[in-house]
Image (tube, rainbow, N blue to C red):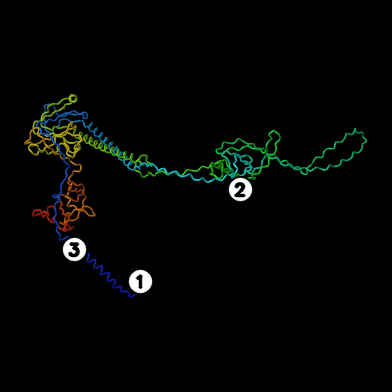
């Protein structure tokens, strides 16, 4: 835009600069106010250890009985081979003494076999899930709607054929169109087995009939010359004979040279050529039926001109040149070749194949229509889902069998679980035949608890773990240490389902020793609580949810920094336990750190931390977090 020459440009520049300065002052003032507020704000903080907890796994409950005469019994196992026994009958043993050692080679093979079985079950599950996906992606078969039949259209009348149909094409056959040139050849309507005669071929090639009789040249009659009269002779002569006057010989003025007559072209046997009959041998004169002398053929109505020319032979539907062409072939008298018998064959359209280059190799795709109805597909999907549920149970069972095999390998060395005496030691065959233990250790001191645990806890509850037991009679609590877990499932279990385990699974007996058994009696019933280590159990921090806030950047806490002020610190979180604690998965927060409650007017980034316990040591001046005060 062009400004007038007298436009006050200086005033405009002054105005713009003034606005910029005002905006800068406003921003500076706001920033200073915020920083001043943060610098003067004070927020209470709490140590993480006071507002967090830890998760050690789920708890399961069972019940058992107290006994003062515990007996450790070892039964023969067909799947285990004993490599060495370390005790004999009558030996005194203590808890932890080695009794026998199983052969680890067979146990290792069992572990490998269970690993293969688990992989097999997982593969079967994966295949079933892929088949389910395929069924869910299959469109059901829809019965096609049969449209009402449309009335037959009135056929377009086909003009009658005006061309003559030939089964034998001669030099007198008349084409129905064409001029005999390469661009516009003579066209003949013929049948598929039509033949070409010699006369036609000679016309086509422009060759003269080699056996035609040449027209003779007329010879002029000569004038006879007068003979001289004989003079009488004095010598006697014989009786004169009548003189025979010879006939005058026609002497041509110029004796014509007779042209050599070419040998007639004899027909030869036709080679086998696909698509066309061979030439029919024809004569140039027709013999009388009585066997008399040949007579000339009657003069035809049409004769093809002398060639060479181009001819085309066409076969049409219903022998009508107005209907579609079935096949055709063409001959050129100037450049005839051995391959002129060609049928018209249309090439097929390109076939479009489906593009499967980006397909998942584990899943097959149906490129055709489905033959299953919607009801059939629903039933198949339901059956496949049930199969998947069964396979999932098989996978869990295989994983359990593998875990048990690993435990057998780890526990290949059997130790005493009681303080007592080896009461009996018999050979394995006898114990096997009588279904009795081959080694019995009888204990005589202290109290033991015998109870059962669910098979889902195998591998999570171990020998050496502590359980809590409460007496029904005296109301006291007892702490016991697990000293044995049976290798064989119970026939009848006294384990009751508390909602944390599968009630349909097997149970295994375990024994725990009570160190302080005051008030217990033999056979007293006890409620037992087991702590099963979780797969996710760790030293992770589970922070109280109220101290965690989120914004567009994610979840964060107001953590005290080295400057004793709180700063927004982003964290990674995991699962929630007890509905109020959230797992902290990042390393940015420890139990020794301090955090502020992230809500309220004073909970701002940069606020001064209040409530941190100062170290009482007069010399170091270090606060409770280990930072310089």
- Pick the quarter of the image with the C terminus: bottom left
Residue 6 in the image, given as x and y percentages of width and height: 33, 75
Q: Considering only vertical position in the picture, is 13 above or below 545? A: below
Nearer-the-camera pick, 97 or 253: 253
Residue at the left extreme? 519
User: Dot 1 surroundings within 10 Å: few (below 14), some, or many (20 or more)?
Assistant: few
Residue 32 x, y percent position in the rendering: 19, 63
User: Which of marks 2 and 1 precedes in the sequence?
Assistant: 1
Secondary structure state at the residue bearing disc 1: loop
| Picture disc at residue 33 | 3
Kindly report the distance in space between the C-alpha atoms of the residues bearing marks 1 and 2: 82 Å
Label 3's element? helix
Q: Name the residue under label 1.
A: 2
Q: How many marks?
A: 3
> Is 307 situated left or right of 615 in this image?
right
Q: Which of marks 1 and 3 is nearer the N terminus?
A: 1
Q: Quadrant of residue 215?
A: top right
Q: Where is residue 570 in the image (x, y as percent from the top left)?
A: 21, 53
The residue indicated by pointer 2 is 179
- Disc 3 crowd rating (10 Å Cα; few below 14, some 14-19, many 20+) is few
Discs 3, 2 touching: Cβ within 8 Å = no
Specify few, some or many for label 2: CA neighbours under 10 Å numbering under 14, 14-19, or 20 or more.
Answer: some
Q: In this view, does 75 lie above or below 165?
A: above
> To which quarter of the image does residue 376 belong?
top left
């Amino acid at each position: 835009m062009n400004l007038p020459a007298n436009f006050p440009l200086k005033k405009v520049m002054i105005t713009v600069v003034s606005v910029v300065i005002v905006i800068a002052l406003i921003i500076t003032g706001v920033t200073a106010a915020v920083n001043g507020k943060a610098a003067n704000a004070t927020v209470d903080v709490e140590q993480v250890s006071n507002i967090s907890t830890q998760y050690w796994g789920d708890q399961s409950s069972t019940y058992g009985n107290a006994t003062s005469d515990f007996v450790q019994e070892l039964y023969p196992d067909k799947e285990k081979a004993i490599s060495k026994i370390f005790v004999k009958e009558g030996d005194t043993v203590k808890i932890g003494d080695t009794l026998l050692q199983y052969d680890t080679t067979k146990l290792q093979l069992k572990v490998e076999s269970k690993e293969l079985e688990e992989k097999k079950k997982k593969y079967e599950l994966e295949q079933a899930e892929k088949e389910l996906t395929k069924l869910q992606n299959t469109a059901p078969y829809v019965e096609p709607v049969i449209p009402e039949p449309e009335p037959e259209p009135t056929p377009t009348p086909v003009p009658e054929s005006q061309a003559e149909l030939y089964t034998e094409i001669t030099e007198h056959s008349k084409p129905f169109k064409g001029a005999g040139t390469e661009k516009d050849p003579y066209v003949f309507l013929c049948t598929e087995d039509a033949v070409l005669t010699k006369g036609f071929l000679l016309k086509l090639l422009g060759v003269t009939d080699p056996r035609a009789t040449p027209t003779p040249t007329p010879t002029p009659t000569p004038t006879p010359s007068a003979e001289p009269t004989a003079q009488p002779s004095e010598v006697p002569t014989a009786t004169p004979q009548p003189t025979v006057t010879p006939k005058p010989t026609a002497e041509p003025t110029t004796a014509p040279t007779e042209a050599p007559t070419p040998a007639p072209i004899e027909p030869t046997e036709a080679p086998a050529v696909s698509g066309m009959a061979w030439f029919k041998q024809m004569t140039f004169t027709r013999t009388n039926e009585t066997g008399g002398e040949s007579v000339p053929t009657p003069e035809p109505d049409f004769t093809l001109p002398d060639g060479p020319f181009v001819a085309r032979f066409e076969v049409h539907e219903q022998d009508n040149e107005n209907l579609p062409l079935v096949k055709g072939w063409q001959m050129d008298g100037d450049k005839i070749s051995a391959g002129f018998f060609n049928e018209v064959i249309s090439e097929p359209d390109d076939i479009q194949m489906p593009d499967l280059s980006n397909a998942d190799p584990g899943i097959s795709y149906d490129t055709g229509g489905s033959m299953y109805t919607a009801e059939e597909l629903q039933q198949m999907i339901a059956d496949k889902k049930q199969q998947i549920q069964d396979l999932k149970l098989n996978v869990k069972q295989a994983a359990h069998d593998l875990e048990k095999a690993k435990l057998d390998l780890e526990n290949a060395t059997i130790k005493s679980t009681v303080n007592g005496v080896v009461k009996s030691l018999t050979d394995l065959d006898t114990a096997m035949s009588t279904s009795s233990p081959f080694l019995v250790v009888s204990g005589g001191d202290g109290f033991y608890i015998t109870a059962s645990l669910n098979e889902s806890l195998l591998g999570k509850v171990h020998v050496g773990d502590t359980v809590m037991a409460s007496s029904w009679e005296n109301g006291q609590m007892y702490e016991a240490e697990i000293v044995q877990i049976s290798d064989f499932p119970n026939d009848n279990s006294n384990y009751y389902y508390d909602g944390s385990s599968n009630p349909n699974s097997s149970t295994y007996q375990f024994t725990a020793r009570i160190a302080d058994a005051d008030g217990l009696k033999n056979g007293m019933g006890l409620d037992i609580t087991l702590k099963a280590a979780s797969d996710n159990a760790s030293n992770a921090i589970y922070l109280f949810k109220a101290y965690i806030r989120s914004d567009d950047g994610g979840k964060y806490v107001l953590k005290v920094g080295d400057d004793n002020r709180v700063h927004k610190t982003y964290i990674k979180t995991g699962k929630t336990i007890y509905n109020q604690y959230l797992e902290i998965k990042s390393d940015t927060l420890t139990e020794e750190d301090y955090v502020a409650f992230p809500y309220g007017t004073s909970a701002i980034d940069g606020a001064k931390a209040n409530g941190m316990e100062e170290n009482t040591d007069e010399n170091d001046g270090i606060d409770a977090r280990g930072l310089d005060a």
